[in-house]
Image (spheres, helix red, strand yellow):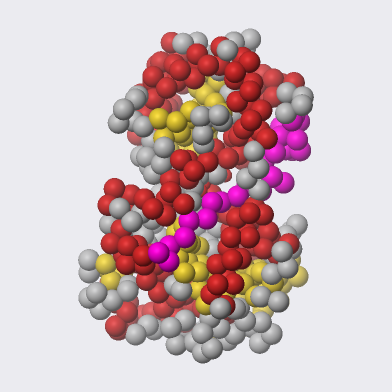
Amino acid sequence: MMRVLHATTELFPWVKTGGLADVAAALPEALGEMGIDTRTIVPGFPAIMAALENRASIYEVHGLFATATTRILYGHLPDRKTAVYVVDSPALFQRPGDPYSHPQGGDWNDNLLRFAVLGWAAAKLAGGELDRQWRADVLHVHDWHPALAHAYLSETWPPVKTVFTIHNIDYPGRFPPHDYGRLGLPHWLAAPYGPLEFFGDLCFLKAGILLAHRVTTVSPTYADEITRGRFGGGLDGVVRARGDRLVGILNGVDYRTWDPRHDTHLPCAYDPHSLAGKTACRAHLRRHFSLTENASEPIFVVISRLNWQKGLDLVVDAAETIVASGAQLVVIGSGEGHLEWQFRQLQDRFPRQVGVHIGYSVPLAHLSMAGGDALLMPSRHEPCGLTQLYAKRYGTLPVVQSVGGLADTVAPQTGFIFDEHFTSLADVVQHVTYVHRHQARWQHMMLTAMAQDFGWENSAREYLRVYRELQG
Ligand code: ADP
Ligand code: GLC
């Protein structure tokens, strides 16, 4: 049986800042269902430590990179078949805030060390040095955080095959070089032109791209885009160096969590054959935000990190058009302060037509997905995007720019596509409102979107093909 170890910092529902958590939770389970012995290694963040069941300490190391004791625990998380290894290093991971930054907002200043320890543990575990009963045939590393695993594996024998998935090239994991001496890695890796060196800094993502046996990213269009300057975040040359080994595999949807047929966050269930529940969810959403009830124009929803990548300034610019047409806007999100402030201002100006929740709220994300009519996701870069896929299942039509995974998953039959260089979002919103008035056409689009299947099975099969190719 093939053994695959996934290394990640995020795991839904315990640790999540974005779609990485959803993917890292669903893909190993899907592979497990295909008969692969899949396990996951994660840092011992507070929520993981609190949830870990049947734990056993399998390894202990003192003073690794001059940090305090690190234990490797083996166990299970509730309702999950995939076994987990947890890097239990309280000094590094038992902290408030999200995985990367302190509650006031800045990155932790020892992130280099924190994630080097994760990469070290992933490599040693995959190579069979930490668990006497298990090693991996394939180590699958997600994003920059565990990417030093590739460096720590360079001397492992027999070699472990590695897959590195880029979830977002805009987050390179870049650090000044002065702590490199603590990491126990050979000098050449970080020397000028070495795989870790990037303009005099250390860059985890670059190391992952150059040292992994195979590199994948989360949609075919993004795989092509990041070979070019506009999307490559300065690493496009490094990606080009990998040439045709870069594969784009679309993310899937975990329909156990995201389906209005059985979504426990909704006041009413619904499906394509009985849409009354969606009407009830819409009413519930309006009441929650004290928006005008009995309005006939659509509700536009945003469920997102609020930043430039996601194009949320375009939504701010379009808001007055939305309001003027009698439509409504609901925003669930957090991120850059100026965007949070602008959305709050809009809510203050138009309290009956704009509802805003600044912060992270799973129940409100689900309710908005169900109660909305159209999802605004005008991202400038979008490696894959999951929210537009969830929206379709809820009959909420996505409004997207034609980039990355959005270009691969939204078509005119199931959503609205634009390019900010040619059309303003305000114009698109007016068009959406116009189509919404033609209910027969709108309903047809909704039903087409709801019937689409983006389940994990296809994507997991494609990853399996990559693993098998590596095994030769
Ligand atoms: P990204 O990973 O770039 O943020 P994705 O579309 O892949 O974009 O995934 C975003 C995930 O985060 C989705 O599961 C979405 O529902 C969730 N999400 C985003 N913002 C919030 C929020 N404010 N509250 C709850 N969930 C959110
Ligand atoms: C990143 C990307 C997003 C993608 C997610 C999961 O956060 O920004 O587009 O869906 O990773 O792969």
Magenta segment, prevailing SS (helix, strand or loop): loop
Residue 74, horizontal then vertical, whole percent: 67, 74
Query: Which quadrant would residue 133 be assigned to in this image?
Result: bottom right
Q: Quadrant of the C terminus?
A: bottom right
In this rendering, would 259 be left or right of 314? right
Outermost residue to the bottom? 157
| Span of residues in magenta | 244-271
Residue at the (39%, 19%) spot, across then down? 427
Residue 73, horizontal then vertical, whole percent: 64, 74
Query: Which quadrant would residue 198 be assigned to in this image?
Result: bottom left
Query: Which quadrant would residue 448 be assigned to in this image?
Result: top right
Residue at the (61%, 14%) spot, across then down? 439
Q: Is residue 398 above or below residue 35?
A: above
Instruction: Using the image as rendered, state which of residue 1 and residue 46 is in the foreground.
Output: 1
Q: Quadrant of the N terminus?
A: bottom right
Q: Is residue 353 above or below residue 101?
A: above
